[in-house]
Amino acid sequence: MKREYYTTRKDKGKRWVGFDATKAPTATDVAWAAGIYEGEGTCSTKRKGANSFSVTVSQKDPELLGRLREWFGGSVICFKNGKFECHRWAVSGDRARVFLACIYPFLTARRKSQIDTTSARFFLDDVVDLLTPDFGTEPYSVCVALWDRLQDIENHQRQKAAEHKKQRHHEYHVKKSQDPAWMEKRRLQTAARRKLQKEQSLKVVGINKTA
């Protein structure tokens, strides 16, 4: 059975605790971040065929990277680039999806085409109605709406995944039911389980009578 839905990959576990944004970006902040990404950013899939991807921006000066981390989460690390010390801001999972959706309307066609080759395209297609710059509110209302939409999408994905698993389970048993050897093995397993349950019930009854 072919899967007819896509899944998002979230940053989970203790490793990513504290990697959320600490400030709400304004419309001006988002436009500024788009300019930084336009000049210095990259977006790539982590592994071939994977749904997860990452966004990175590298700079010698960590100050502007700190702003990106405050507004969109992620991490800033220091590394050696030859003889020079460099810093990199990196964000992935849901944080990267929301960041790209926020800045997408401000980017050039070349940058948009690069993003469209990653799995971020699935999320952008689902929020296309929100990809319009809004300078009328503070903080940037589009960012808030994107997080709300992302939650709705994830709930829908979980529902589709549960339906897909149930259908595959049904198809598996229909196929196996045509195999006499498999059916006999299942019958023996069921009989053994019922026997064990009966023995445990009798044991409990005996303990209660003794008490």
Image (cartoon, rainbow, N blue to C red):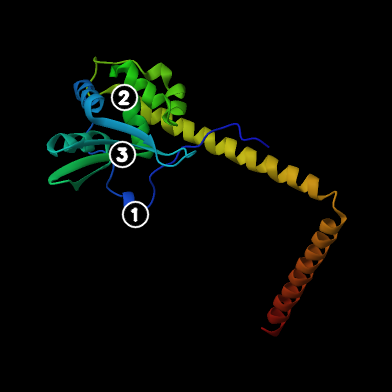
State the residue at coordinates (73%, 43%). 170
**Mark 3 nearby-residue class (10 Å; few <14, some 14–19, many ≥20):** many
Q: Nearer the viewer, residue 134 or 203?
A: 134
Residue wearing tag 2: 102
Label for residue 91?
A: 3
Q: Position of residue 190 (x, y in %)?
A: 79, 63
Q: Residue furthest right?
A: 180
Q: Position of residue 130 (x, y in %)?
A: 38, 19
**Mark 2 nearby-residue class (10 Å; few <14, some 14–19, many ≥20):** many
In the figure, is residue 197 to the left or right of 16? right
Amino acid type, callout 2: Cys
- 3 or 1: mark nearer the eye: 3
Q: Is residue 151 above or below residue 177?
A: above
Residue wearing tag 1: 14
Chain-order first, disc 2 or disc 1: 1
Chain-order first, disc 3 or disc 1: 1
Q: Is residue 15 above or below residue 3?
A: below
Question: Quick check: can you spot residue 25?
Answer: no
Chain-order first, disc 3 or disc 2: 3
Q: Nearer the viewer, residue 205 or 83?
A: 83
Q: Position of residue 154 (x, y in %)?
A: 48, 35
| Marks 3 and 2 in Cβ contact (< 8 Å) | no
In the figure, is residue 53 to the left or right of 106? right
Amino acid type, callout 3: Val
Label for residue 141?
A: none
Question: Quick check: can you spot residue 151?
Answer: yes
Label 3: state its secondary structure: strand
